[in-house]
Image (cartoon, coloured by chain):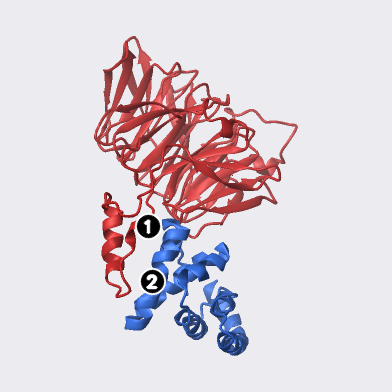
Amino acid sequence: MAGAEGFVESDNAEAIITRIEHKTRKIESLLKQFKPVEALKTALEGTYAMTSDERCKSAHWIVVHRAIMAIKDVDGMLSSLDPEYYDILMKYLYRGLATGDRPTCDQCLRIHEKLTERAGHGCILRFLTDTVNTV
Amino acid sequence: MAVIAVHQFAQCITCHAWSPDQSMVAFCPNNNEVHIYRLVEDKWEKVHVLEKHDQVISGIDWSARSNRIVTASHDRNSYVWNLEGSEWVPTLVILRLNRAALCVQWSPKENKFAVGSGAKTVCICYYEQENNWWVSKLIRKRHDSSVTSVSWHPNNILLATTSTDGKCRVFSTFIKGVDAKDSKKGTSSDLKFGELIVQLDLSSSWTFGVKWSPSGNTLAYVGHNSMIYFVDDVGPSPLAQNVVFRDLPLRDVLFVSEKTVIGVGFDCNPMVFAADERGVWGFIRYLGERKTVSSGSTYGSQFSEAFGKFYGQSKHGVSNDAVETSKTRGAVHDNCINSIIPLGQHGILTRRFSTSGLDGRIVLWDLENEQDLLEL
C-alpha cells in the first residue's frame, strides 16, 4: 500500500513544492506587515496533505520554521491560534528541538512551555504516538 | 462528592470483579492468585484465595446470574470457578493460545465468554453439556497485534475488540447450538462465526477499553494518544467522532447512560464525557477533585520538577510553576486506574461504579450527588 502511494506522490510532490513556494511568498508578505500569527497559521495549514516524501516535509519545515522564529509574543500568538492547530504545532516544535540549533531550540522551548500549558500533556502524547502523520 | 469509599487492598491490583450482590470483591494483587474479600461488619475479610494460575491474572469477570468467576492469565490459560459449598472449584478451559490472555468477559446471557490475547486471537468459549467442559473457538484472522480489550453487545452475539494495532473491530460470535438464530434481523452472512462486521481504523496508536452503550447503538474506545473515539450506528456506515482531550491517556471506559461515558486512565481521576442534543461528544469534567499546582509553590510532583529542569535550560527564564498537572496530592487514586466496573445488575443502568488501579486501591463512586451530570 505504501509503495502505490509513493508512486502517485512523486507527481504530487512537485505540486506540493509549488504550493509551498506560494506559501513562502505569502508568509514573507505577512511578516513584513508584522502579522506573525497569521504567518504561522498559513504555514501550518495543509501540512498534512499527502506527505511521506522527505523533500515535501523539509520544504514544509523550512516554511514553518521561518514563521516560528518570527514570533515575539508567544502568549498572544497562542491565544489567537485555533486549538485545532495545537497538535500540528507541537509536532513542528519537536522537529525544531531536534535540530540542535541554539536559537531555534530556544524559541521552540519557549513556545513548548506555553503550548503545554494550554493544550496539556495530551498534545505531547499525540505527537509521540502518531507515527502516520509525521512532520 | 462522587467517591463513596476507598479501600486499599494490596500494593497493586491488575483487575477486579464484584459478586452478584456486591458483598464480595475478587481481584488479583499483581500475582498469580485471586483474592476474594467479603465485607463483614464494615471490615473487609479475605475469605478465599484462588490459586491455580502460574502467572499474573490479567482479567476477572464474575457472572451475575450464574455466579461463576472466569479468570484469564498470562500463563495462557483460563479457569472457570464454580462455588461448590464453600469452596471455589476451578475448571480449566483449554484456550489453545500460545501467548498470554489479556482480558476476559462473560457474555450478557452468561453462556459464553470471550478472551483477548497476545496471540492476536480472540477465544470464544462455551459450555458443552455432553462432555461437561468448556470449548474454545478461536477468531484467528484479522488482528495484527495483541487484543487488549473485548466487549459484548447486548444481543449476546456481536463482540467488539480493541488491539494494539490501533483498530477496533466488531465480530459475530454466533455458535450453532448455543445461540438462537434471530429470524427477524441480520442476513445469514452476519451470523457466521468470526465474521468481521466492521473495522474501525480511527487511531494510529494502541487502543484499549472498548464498551458498548446500553442499547448497543454506540461504541466507545480509547487510544493511547489521549483520544477517545465514539462510534454511533455501528454497521455499514458508522458515524465516528474523535474527541481530543488535554491530559494523559485513558485505559478503560464505562457507559453510565446512553449519552454519558466515564473514562479512567493515567490521570488517576475519572473523566466524564457526554453527548449533547446534537449527538456531539465532548469532555465535561473530572469526577474527583483536582488541585492545580499554583504558582510559587514548591514542585510537589515529579512532573513539575522535570518540567522545571526542561525549561530551566532556556536562557529566557524559568516560569514552570504555571505548568498544570492533574496529579493531585490527596487524590483518590495515586497511580494509573486501569479498570472501571459498574456496580449493580448487569444490563441495568447504574450510577454506581468502582475503579481499581496500580496503587492497589478499589474506589467506589456514585453519581447520585453530581447534579450537573445527572441532568445530561
Are circles 2 and 1 on residues that touch, CB within 8 Å? no
Q: Identify the residue at the far front of this view.
A: B296
Inter-mark Cα distance, 2 to 1: 13 Å
> Chain B's colour?
red
Q: Mark 2 lies on which chain?
A: A
Q: Residue at x 71, y 39 (%)?
A: B186
Residue in front for this viewpoint, B182 or B336: B336
**Relative side of B301 to A28, left or right:** left
Q: Give the label on residue A110, or none.
A: 2
Q: In this view, does A81 lie above or below B8?
A: below
- A66 to the left or right of B154: left
Amino acid, disc 2? Arg
- Name the secondary structure under disc 1: helix
Residue that appears at 31% across and 37% down: B330
Q: Which amino acid does label 1 sit on?
A: Ala
Chain ID at mark 1: B
Residue B108: image location, x then y, percent:
55, 28
Position of B328 relative to B2 (above/below):
below
Query: Dot 1 surroundings within 10 Å: few (below 14), some, or many (20 or more)?
Result: some
Q: Where B305 sits versus B71, above or below?
A: below
Count of numbered circles in the view:
2
Residue B254 x, y percent position in the rendering:
51, 36
Q: Mark 1 points at which residue?
A: B322
Could you say which chain is coloured blue in the image? A
Place residue B30 in its image quadrant: top left
